[in-house]
Image (tube, rainbow, N blue to C red):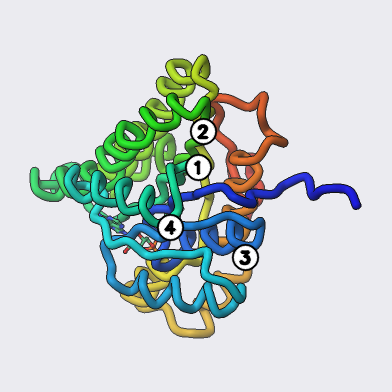
Amino acid sequence: MTAPLIAFDGRTVVVTGAAKGIGRAIAMRFLQCGARVVIADSDEGGLDTAKRLAEREGHARVHFIRCDVSKRSEIEALVDGTARHFGAVDVLVNNAGIFPRADLLQTDEAFWDNVLGINLKGAYLLCQAVVPAMMERGGGVIVNIGSNHAAAGEPATMAYAVSKGGIVTLTKNLAKALAKHNIRVNCVQPGWVASEGEVARWKANGMDEEQIAALSARVQTGEDIADAVVFLASGMSKQIIGQVLVVDGGASVGRVQ
Ligand SMILES: NC(=O)c1ccc[n+]([C@@H]2O[C@H](COP(=O)([O-])OP(=O)(O)OC[C@H]3O[C@@H](n4cnc5c(N)ncnc54)[C@H](O)[C@@H]3O)[C@@H](O)[C@H]2O)c1
């Protein structure tokens, strides 16, 4: 029988922000491809997510570790805990993120520090924590989750947009620096995804269930993003380094969703 083109059997994958939303879909796809997956999230709900994914996929290749990605000590505990449970990290997916709204004049320092601390510093700290073992082991893969807000100029997401612009820069900088160590770094840029976080925002803005269902049907799913992440983590993309893969259903080329 021919081996599947995308398989992660025996590989250890860490997905941050995987208690729900896009991260959970990414964790599920990796499990479906045979990986051992650590769900890293600041929300204890990640434990329940891990249990449900294990039941659904019928195995125990999934483990939850509570971790606030903006805190170095918790990241160190995540990497140590992953090593003890499954082994060294082969694939890191920097997905954890928050997207609160505020324009320049509404953004105080605490707001800025919180958004940048989670969305950008978290990715830097995680890369720094996993890369030494990847170098020792002869390679690895990092996939960062960006956003079209990086270049969209949306006033109400000023700090968020800056954090996601930083994610693109971090991706390209590390991609060049780490390629010689056989560590590939890329970015997936989702367009608009009906994740739990996004749907909660729609509800807070007054949308009813019918409107939410209609909009959800027009935008991307977490699985759409997960498929791109799994591709960039697989050997099928081994010549793709330092790139931003846009998954937006054509919105960036003018398709109206
Ligand atoms: N939903 C969209 O339309 C969209 C579009 C572009 C990019 N993105 C990006 O995709 C990623 C996932 O977003 P989502 O829509 O699934 O959001 P979500 O709110 O549904 O899920 C985000 C997850 O991240 C976790 N998280 C938050 N802060 C954390 C921290 N400090 N440490 C660890 N985990 C933390 C949350 O607990 C949650 O489980 C984010 O980086 C977001 O910016 C989302």
Corner quadrant of residue 158: top left
Task: Report if the CB atoms under discs 4 and 1 are less than 8 Å apart.
Answer: no
In the rendering, at what x and y percent does residue 40 appear? Answer: 35, 58
Query: Along the horizontal axis of the image, is 137 left or right of 110?
Result: right
Q: 153 or 32: which is nearer to us?
A: 32
| Circle nearer the N terminus (3, 2) | 2
In the displayed structure, 26 sits above or below 132; it is below
Q: Nearer the viewer, mark 3 or mark 2?
A: 2
Q: Are marks 1 and 2 in contact (CB under 8 Å)?
A: yes
Q: Which residue is mark 1?
A: 91
N-terminal label among 1 and 2: 1
Mark 4, ligand 1, within 8 Å: the answer is: no
Q: Residue at x 38, y 48 (%)?
A: 83
Mark 4–mark 1 Cα distance, whole angstroms, equals 10 Å
Disc 2 target residue: 140
Where disc 2 sits, the SS reads strand
Q: Which residue is mark 4?
A: 38
